[in-house]
Image (cartoon, grey):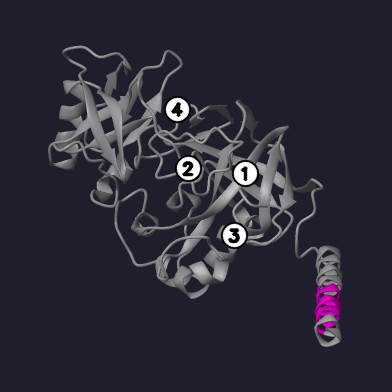
Amino acid sequence: GPAAMAGWAKAAALTAAAAYGAMKMIEEMRKRGLIGTEEWVEVGTVTTLFVYPIKSCKGQAQEALRLDEYGAVNDRRYMIVDENGRFVTQRQEATLCQIAPSISADGSLKIEAPGMSACTVRPTKRTSAEHPELEAGIWEDDVTVVDQGGEISTWLSDFVGRKLRLVGMSERYERISSRKFTPRRSFGKTAFSDGYPLLLISEESLHHLNSLLSVPLPMNRFRPNIVIKTDGGAFAEDSWKRIKIDNLEMDIVKPCSRCKITTTDQVTGYRDEEPLITLSRFRTRKDVGAPCGDKTDVFFGQNVCHMTEGEVRRGHRVFARRNLFFFLSPMFV
């Protein structure tokens, strides 16, 4: 009847008004730079690059990162495991930070540590009596790996003081990053990193954190692959949904939750309470709009997934597309 028609007309008018209001609000927010546009905007420059050849051991600064389907070449392609094949990190053994691995041009792996003679081995993906294929556990994943032999395992066990072995990716190795957050367009694979192939942090974010700490911390506490000097101020990277470095496009997937490795002095292995206490005051899940994690988690840096192989060099300019809403995954924006 007429009453129903009037009701429908009123509802339609309200809906139209709400839609118009939302459009005007989005337009205003775009003007103010609060939400994203599809245009690339120059946001900074690559200043430092790192690889960590053995998971949870010392990193190596690089002039360039070569990216293959798993991430940066020579980055976390080896991992230390215990007698049960479970991964071992600085969370359990802080002294791993003192082990300095390096990979030479011919592919040999050398490890050094205070008070130890250097140990050099030729890593392999092929199985043999000396290099058996094993199943190893890293977080919730079981992966197929190759034991890297008795010599390097003995060295690690002697240095740390418990039975350990070094394993590498086998020819049958397969591990995908979180399907929930990894954009379908990316490779979606990772080596032995915690969850994603690359980690990005801006110098400005660390500078801001250090301004709140009584003792400033070096970048090595946070173990990034790509460090950027940005024009956008501290935590500008929170608002990026995609970046382009020398025509290599990458997705900013989600903020990186941080553990007690960040509290470990990467020279001495001494553990403190910072920066986790200070980060808990302004970098919680709620603060950063992280799409997952516990209430008590803190976040610093951004997990990144790449789509193509290529090279990132120091000095490369960085372009970004702003995230529509910071809490949305790149899968949805």
**Mark 1 — residue?**
251
**Mark 3 — residue?**
205
The crowding category of the residue bearing disc 2, from other C-alpha atoms within 10 Å (few below 14, some 14 to 19, many at least 20), is many
Element carrying mark 1: strand
Relative height, residue 192 to residue 270 (above, below): above
The crowding category of the residue bearing disc 1, from other C-alpha atoms within 10 Å (few below 14, some 14 to 19, many at least 20), is many
Count of labels shown? 4
In this rendering, position of residue 178 left or right of residue 315: left
The image shows residue 179 at horizontal and vertical percentages of 48, 44
Residues 148 and 212: in front is 148
Secondary structure mostly taken by the magenta-highlighted segment of the chain:
helix
Residue type pointed to by label 4: Asn
Mark pair 4, 3: CA separation:
26 Å
The reply to whether the C-beta atoms of the residues labelled 4 and 3 are less than 8 Å apart is no
Q: What stretch is highlighted in magenta?
A: 7-18
N-terminal of the two: label 4 or label 3? 4
Relative height, residue 36 to residue 214 (above, below): above
Residue type pointed to by label 1: Asp
The image shows residue 124 at horizontal and vertical percentages of 32, 16
The reply to whether the C-beta atoms of the residues labelled 2 and 4 are less than 8 Å apart is no
In this rendering, position of residue 208 left or right of residue 76: right
The N terminus lies in quadrant: bottom right
In this rendering, position of residue 229 left or right of residue 14: left
